[in-house]
Image (tube, rainbow, N blue to C red):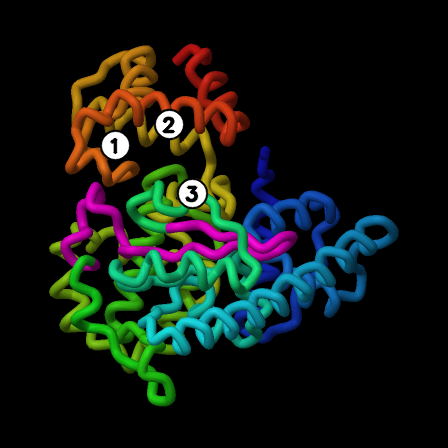
Amino acid sequence: MEINQKTSDYLIALLRAMVRQEQPAEKPTEVDWKDVLNLARYHQVDEMIYDAVKRLEKGPEGDLLERLEEVHRNNQLVNMFQQAEAKMIIEQSTKGEYYILPLKGAVMKEIYPNPLYRQMGDLDYLVEEKSINDFIPMMKELGYEAFDVGLEDSHDVYKKRPYIEVEIHRRLLPPTEENHWYTDKIWERLVPDAENLYLLHMTLEDYYLFHLLHFEKHYSMGGSGIRSILDQYYLMKVYQEQLDWNYINEILPKFHYVEFEKMCRDLAECWFGEGTMTEELKGPAEYIINSGVFGNFEQYQKWSFERYQREQGIKTKKGYFFRRMFMERERMEFIYPSIKKHGWLLPFCWIHRLFKSVFCNWGRVKMELKHFRKKD
C-alpha cells in the first residue's frame, strides 16, 4: 500500500500519546481518517488507535466510525478466544507431562499496559522434539485441524476456525539461520514456572535476545512493522533495570547485532520516548512503516535474490527462479527431514513442493511470477 508521510507521522503521534498516557492531538486537516485506520490495520495496532481515537473531540464519523467499532469488537473476540485456547493448551500439555514454552505475542501481552493492545496473529509454543508427535492427538482432541504437520522441520501448524492458529515449534531458529547456535541450547537455560513444573519461561536476557533474533529475521526478509518497535520500547521500559546488560552486550557482537540493536533502541526512543529522529534513523523508520506487521513481499524478494547472489553466485532472475523451484539439498532437508536418511527422495520432494505451492499457495506463487516479470 502507498503510505503518505503525514499519515504515518500522525499514526506514530497517536501511538506515542497512548504509550505515554497523554491526550492525543487532533487529526491534521490534510490527513484522511481512512488512511490512518488502514495503516493501523496494516501494522496491527488498531486497538491502541481505537482507544486514542475515542479520546479525541473529532474522530471518524459515519461508515468509518462503524467500521472502527466493528474491528474493535472483532479484536476483543479474537483476544478472548486466544486467551482461552492458550490456557487450555497449557493445561492439556501439563496433563500429558509435556514441557511447553509460550513464545512471542502471548508473552509480550503481559508487559503491555492493556493486553488488548498487543495483538497477535497466532499462538506459538516451543516443545521438546521427543514430544512433538504427542501434540498431534492432543491438538486434535482440543478441536484443531492439522496443517503441514510433520512436513516442516521447524514447526507444525494447527487451526481452529474461524479465529485460532497455533504453531508448535521444534526449535526457535532453523539450522539455516546464522545464529541458531544460540537458540539450539535454549532448553539448558529455561526456568520452570513457580506453580507449574511443565510451563517454562525464558530468562529476561534470553527473551530480549530472542525478540531481537525474531525481529531481525523478519526485518531482513522483507520487513517488520511498528509493532516490533513497540515491543522493543516496552521491553526497555519494563525490564531496563532488571536485565543483565553485561551478558547481553557480550552476546550481541557474536550475533553481529550491535548496530541492529542500537537502531531498535534509538528508534523506539525516537517514536515513543525522549529520543529524536536522526539521519541514520530515517531509512529504517521508512522501511519499517512501509513493511506492515508481517513484511512486504517485494522487499522479501529483493532480500532473497540478493542472498542467492551473495551465497551462490546466481546473477539472473531466471537462475534465481530455477533455484527457488529446485532448492539445494541442505534447505530441502530442513523442509523434508526424511531426505537426511534417504537422499534418493530429493527429486520426489521437489515435485511435492512444486505441487503444494501451486495448489496451496497459488496466491504467493502468482506474486512471485509477477515480480520475476518486472524489469530491473
- The numbered disc on residue 148 is 3
As measured in the structure, the alpha-carbon distance from the residue carrying label 3 to the one carrying label 2 is 12 Å
Residue visible at 17% across and 23% down in the picture: 312
Residue visible at 77% across and 57% down in the picture: 70
Q: Which residues are magenta?
A: 156-183
N-term mark: 3 or 2: 3
- The numbered disc on residue 353 is 2
How would you rate the neighbour count of disc 2 (Cα within 10 Å): few for under 14, some for 14-19, many for 20 or more?
A: some
Q: What residue did someone put label 1 on?
A: 332
Residue 247 forms part of the magenta stretch? no
Looking at the picture, tell me which residue is in the foreground, 90 or 35. Answer: 90
For the residue marked with disc 1, what is the amino acid? Met
N-term mark: 2 or 1: 1
For the residue marked with disc 2, what is the amino acid? Arg
Quadrant that contains the C terminus: top left
For the residue marked with disc 3, what is the amino acid? Asp
How would you rate the neighbour count of disc 1 (Cα within 10 Å): few for under 14, some for 14-19, many for 20 or more?
A: many
- Mark 2 vs 1: CB contact within 8 A: yes
Q: Position of residue 39 (x, y in %)?
A: 61, 46
As measured in the structure, the alpha-carbon distance from the residue carrying label 1 to the one carrying label 3 is 15 Å
- SS class of the residue under badge 1? helix
